[in-house]
Amino acid sequence: MFLLGDVITYVRRIIKSPSNAMISDNLIIDYINRFWITDIDARVQLFDFKTLYRFQTTPGIDSYNMPLYTVQTEPGSQEIASYPVYQGFMPLATVNGIQVPFFTQRQDFWNLWPNYLQALTPATTGNGTSGPYTIDLPFFPAIPGHVDMTGIVATNSVYGDPPIVSDFLTTIPSTSVYSGVFFTATGTSGQTMVVADSGQFLSGAQNYGLLMNPGSAPFGNSACAGGYSTTSNTVNYETGVAVVNFPADVEDGSNINAQCYFYEQGVPRGILYYNNVITIRPPCDISYLVELEAYLSPAAFLASSQAVQFGYMCEYIARGAARKILSDTGDVEQFQFYEPLFREQEQLVWKRSQRQFTSTRTQTIFSSSQGQNGTNSIGTGTN
């Protein structure tokens, strides 16, 4: 039993449905995928799903979303979309092979690398019009704005991550946008106006971030008047030069202020994983290879001839899918009869991982790792 077709056959035996007349193979595959994708990782953390996530950083970019699977299509044209490739990340974390601290609590990370935003700095003055105004940021290169994973899902991943566009996207929820550059001014009616970067980048000129008028949730962010190009409603993060159109006329002679997040670029020395986003500090000056321990979220099964990656899990997968079918159809008697057998299979599957997790000795202050001594000299043996 190493093919999906074998798993389907076993599911049919459990639910007493030998043919497509009562329940189709396509529907059974859907139940198998529901158990395989959403249930297993929540029920047991398996050693076989432990893996390594690797990516190359982009100079100047400090935030990276957890990757998503591309749209997968089950038999029967049922689409499966927008779920993470990995269940989560954990230490060991390295940058170009060198271990760096890994954080999952924001307060610990920001205590070491404060996300400093300098005080409002007058950058130019209003002239009684809405713009355009050419404004220099007080510090640059500036840290760009960011669109989180929920925002990327809202675009159906058509525009990439981060979104690279020729015009402003209004389909990204305002709660998914984390701006890094801000411009404020006083309108002729006395109102305070704010323009910020959107986390969207200009197609063909990817150092340029699109500016926006921030608005209320859920989709209140709006485009700036005048369109988008390298000379209209964008900020060049590398040079710190922005061209800004405000939503209304700026009071003549009043200050137009600029703010941005700034950190001297260099070799990343710390990693934060929070809200499905990997944040590195300091922002990198060149590309670096980041590697993180991870648990894989397996891809969906898409054909009955597809091999099961881990053959020892076949009966567990079949019993898990059948269990979901029996609960949905209300067959309580059969569900209760097979539940102990499902639990038995779960324990057998988990036992394999348990053996691996317990095979390594827990390190103490009186022991050292093989191949290293107390001075961390590799290859000189143990104390």
Image: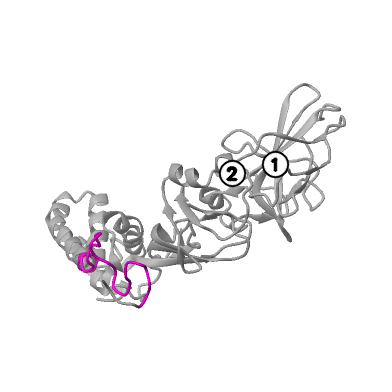
User: Which residue is at 27% across, 50% downward?
Assistant: 328
Mark 1: amino acid? Met
| Quarter assignment of residue 379 | bottom left
What whole-number distance in Å separates the C-alpha atoms at marks 2 and 1?
11 Å
Q: Quadrant of residue 78?
A: bottom left
Q: Amino acid at mark 2?
A: Val
Disc 1 secondary structure class: strand
- Provide the major secondary structure of the magenta segment: loop
Whether residue 290 is situated above or below residue 121 in the rendered picture: below
Q: Are marks 2 and 1 in contact (CB under 8 Å)?
A: yes
Report the residue marked by disc 1. 212
Q: Is residue 250 magenta?
A: no
Residue displayed at 49% across by 46% down: 112
Seen at 61% across and 62% down, the residue is 58
In screen coordinates, is 252 left or right of 257?
right
Depth order, front residue of 6/132: 132
Relative horizontal placement of residue 275, taking residue 216 as reference (left or right): left
User: Which range is magenta?
Assistant: 354-379
Tag 1 or tag 2, which sits nearer the N-term? 2
Residue identified by numbered label 2: 177
Tag of residue 80: none
Instruction: Name the image quarter holding the C terminus.
Output: bottom left
